Image (cartoon, grey):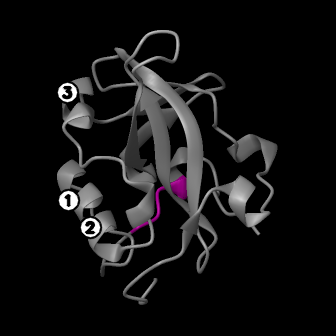
């Protein structure tokens, strides 16, 4: 469990970490709880202390890449993963109303709390937190 009041979170490409092919879900379609296409997994954000994926950066909306919006979704909100699709347990409207994606705040614990709070998830640093990798069949750990 992370106890640092701030956490260093980074994209694999920024950290020099490699992603095991089985865990690399970038580029997969994201579907909401009703099965509607939400967007694509644009990137993963990994915490430097525990080496686990904490957030997905999902690009959604727009047309042909124009006017698209980025949202962070906690890895905890994934319900299933296939070779092409990542399903989450929220609606498109709920994701659209999430805290604005602000890369400048990504290391701020209070920003993470607002994301986890919006989705009703237990933050990864809280007592009782259970990492979802086991039930998703993936470790989501990177070294």
Image spot of residue 66 (x, y percent):
46, 17
Disc 1: which residue: 117
Identify the secondary structure beneath mark 3. helix
Residue at image location 33% in from the left, 65% down from the top: 112
Q: Which residues are magenta?
A: 130-134
User: How much space separates mark 1 and mark 3, taking CA atoms?
Assistant: 16 Å
* Residue 111 is a magenta residue: no
The earlier-in-sequence mark between 1 and 3 is: 3
Describe the element under mark 1 as helix, strand or loop. helix
The residue drawn where x is 23% and y is 61% is 114
Q: Which residue is mark 2?
A: 113
The quadrant holding residue 126 is: bottom left
Which of pointers 3 and 2 lies earlier in the amino acid sequence? 3
Above or below, 138 relative to 27 = below
| Residue located at (51% from left, 18% from top) | 65
Quadrant for the C terminus, please: bottom right
Residue at the image point whose x is 43% and y is 62% from the top:
104
For residue 31, which numbered disc appears in the image? none
Q: Nearer the viewer, residue 93 or 105?
A: 105
Left or right side of 70 for 50: right
Q: Which mark is residue 93?
A: 3
Residue 3, position in %: x, y? Answer: 41, 89
Marks 1 and 2: CB-CB under 8 Å?
yes
Which residue in the rendered view is the most extreme toward the top? 63
Q: Residues within 10 Å of mark 3 (few under 14, many from 20)?
A: few
Secondary structure category for the residue under label 2: helix
Q: Quadrant of residue 117?
A: bottom left
Q: How far apart are the alpha carbons under marks 3 and 2?
A: 20 Å
**Could you give the CA–CA distance between mark 1 and mark 2, rounded to whole angstroms?**
6 Å
């Amino acid at each position: 469990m992370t106890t640092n009041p701030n956490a260093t979170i980074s994209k694999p490409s920024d950290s020099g970490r490699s992603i095991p092919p089985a865990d690399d879900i970038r580029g997969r379609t994201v579907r909401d709880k009703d099965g509607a296409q939400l967007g694509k997994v644009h990137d993963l954000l990994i915490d430097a202390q525990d080496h686990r994926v904490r957030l997905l950066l999902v690009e959604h909306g727009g047309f042909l890449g124009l006017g698209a919006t980025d949202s962070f979704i906690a890895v905890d909100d994934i319900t299933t993963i296939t070779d092409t699709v990542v399903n989450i347990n929220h609606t498109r409207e709920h994701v659209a109303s999430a805290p604005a994606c602000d890369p400048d705040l990504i290391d701020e614990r209070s920003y993470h709390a607002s994301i986890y709070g919006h989705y009703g998830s237990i933050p990864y640093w809280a007592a009782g937190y259970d990492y979802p990798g086991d039930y998703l069949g993936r470790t989501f750990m990177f070294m």
